[in-house]
Amino acid sequence: MTNQGFTIQPGIQDAHRDAACTLFWEAFRQKLSKVMHPEYKALKFIGQAMNDRHAISAIADDGRLLGIAGFKTASGAFIGGGLSEISAVYGRWGGLWRGMLLELLERDLEDDVLLMDGIFVDPVARGRGVGTALLDAVAITARDRGLGKVRLDVIDINPRARALYERCGFSAVETSDIGPLRHLFGFQAATTMHLDLQDKTA
């Protein structure tokens, strides 16, 4: 899929993996830094856990990575890895408590729904339609898999992202408060949003 100045492609090119790790961390540092510190270990874990078969990339005409949309299926997630993988980076105890806390952010798969596993765009590329194009590509991926909806979750401290999702047709379903965990993850609530693909094709 080609847009003005960039192309949407499935997967992540080997040459872009380091950039993908950096952009992911920049996008989610505020939420994950207290759990995933120090940064060099966070980047190491992200790089090892990243699954390019569950990602869609936006690539500039000059070859730079501009953004990624990840998704989760029964066969894996964009950022996967279990207790053994995280312990390999942080050690047994460090991996155990981090794994337990990160598990609190996990969302279960649903029938007929493609679950998004993060979307991020290089700040220098914002305003160029990259995020919209990636969301459109996710919708096409879901439709090609015979699914009826796309789900994502947006935190309350990211109103800009929520506005983008609403412009792209996503509707809020429910909002969940995380209680005392707000002191750890840096946000108070997350809103589940759905894109009904049947509505888009009607």
Image: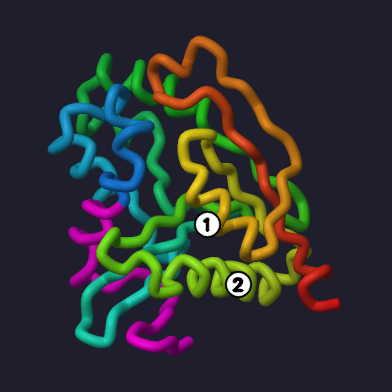
Q: Can the viewer see residue 74 in this picture? A: no
Query: What's the residue type where badge 2 is placed?
Result: Thr
Question: Magenta span has 2?
Answer: yes
Among the 4 quarters of the image, the one containing residue 135: bottom right
Instruction: Report the number of numbered marks.
Output: 2
The answer to whether residue 31 is left or right of residue 39 is right
Q: Give the image location of residue 192, x and y in percent.
A: 66, 41
Q: Which residues are magenta?
A: 1-23
Is disc 2 surrounded by few (<14), some (14 to 19) or many (20+) residues within 10 Å?
A: some
The residue sitting at 43% across, 79% down in the picture is: 8
Q: Tell me the residue that label 1 is attached to.
A: 71
Q: Give the image location of residue 169, x and y in percent.
A: 69, 63
Q: Tell me the residue that label 2 is attached to.
A: 141
Among the 4 quarters of the image, the one containing residue 88: top left
Q: Can the viewer see residue 52 in this picture? A: yes
Instruction: Give yes or no for contact between labels 2 and 1 (Cβ–Cβ under 8 Å).
Output: yes
Rendering colour mode: rainbow
Please report whichever mark, 2 or 1, sits nearer to the chain's N-terminal start.
Answer: 1
